[in-house]
Image: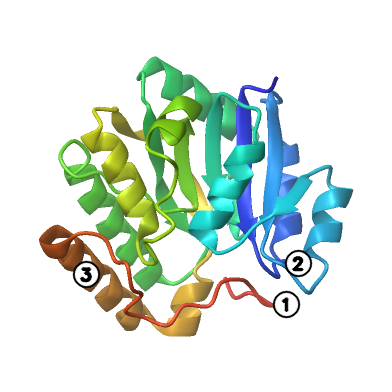
Amino acid sequence: MPKLSIIVPCKNEEASLPKLFASIKSQTFTDYEVIMADAHSTDASAKIATAAGVRVVEGGMPGPGRNKGALQAKGEILFFMDADVELPSPRFLSDVMREFDEKKADVATLQIRPMSDKMLDHVFHGLYNGYVKLTELVRPHAPGFCIIVRRHVHEGIKGFDEEVVFAEDMDYVQRAYKKGHSFRILQSHPIHASVRRFEKDGRFGIGIKYVFGELRMIVKGPFKKNPFDYEMGGDTHPKK
């Protein structure tokens, strides 16, 4: 049985998957499996995954897709990623797994580095990294493209709440924290994340959504109805 199961929800990500899979294959840590939960892609995503030795299972929207992938996973630790992230170093998984164990974390995430040359993107992500570090021990936050969790914790909280349709990733780690599980932001490496949604929806618009979502969850709890339009998946030429 592998120690680690990497789970990637996917829909039409043929442009992004080769880079992700190449960055995973370059790792010095090899005790892992990769599962792609495919939400009925109409492009070559499934073929690309299969050719890379990735197990393809039926997926859905991000939360349900992650749950379906986790049901098929064999690892004792689950690492939820998205198709448009990349691992920055061949030692990434080795260092992250060692720190995860050394800190006795039950749930963890990493700092984010944008795959962008724009100063504004680095400022925005720097503010996010600072905020989540400040609230790490009182109100955990983790983006869905970078959540590391022990299998028994995932199963104990019954996975991602599939009734939550916005910020289901934050709801997930906060429910785990409220159950008494330890949460940490690991410092070994940042994860490299695409800024294509910023390019598509606008940086100001995304910032407003994040602030509104955080305040709304503090006051009223998780979203059971999505207040924003959301379309899962990539395109043939994702912007970086």
Q: Is residue 27 among the parts visible in the rendering?
A: no
Residue 26 relative to residue 175: left or right = right
- The answer to whether the residues at label 3 and label 1 have Cβ atoms under 8 Å apart is no
Residue 197 place in picture, x, y as percent: 48, 74
Residue hosting label 2: 14
Q: Earlier in the sequence, mark 3 or mark 1?
A: 3
Mark 2 and mark 1: span between their CA atoms? Answer: 7 Å
Residue 47 place in picture, x, y as percent: 86, 59
Amino acid of disc 1: Thr
Residue 102 relative to residue 207: left or right = right
Mark 3 and mark 1: span between their CA atoms? Answer: 30 Å
Question: Looking at the image, is 29 positioned above or below residue 111?
Answer: above
Residue 138 place in picture, x, y as percent: 15, 40
Q: Earlier in the sequence, mark 2 or mark 3?
A: 2
Which residue lies at the image location 62% right of the left edge and 34% below the top edge? 5
Q: Quadrant of the N terminus?
A: top right
How many neighbours does mark 1 have within 10 angstroms: few (below 14), some (14-19), or many (20 or more)? Answer: few
How many neighbours does mark 3 have within 10 angstroms: few (below 14), some (14-19), or many (20 or more)? Answer: few
Mark number displayed over residue 236: 1
Amino acid of disc 3: Val
Q: Quadrant of residue 124?
A: bottom left
Q: Quadrant of the C terminus?
A: bottom right
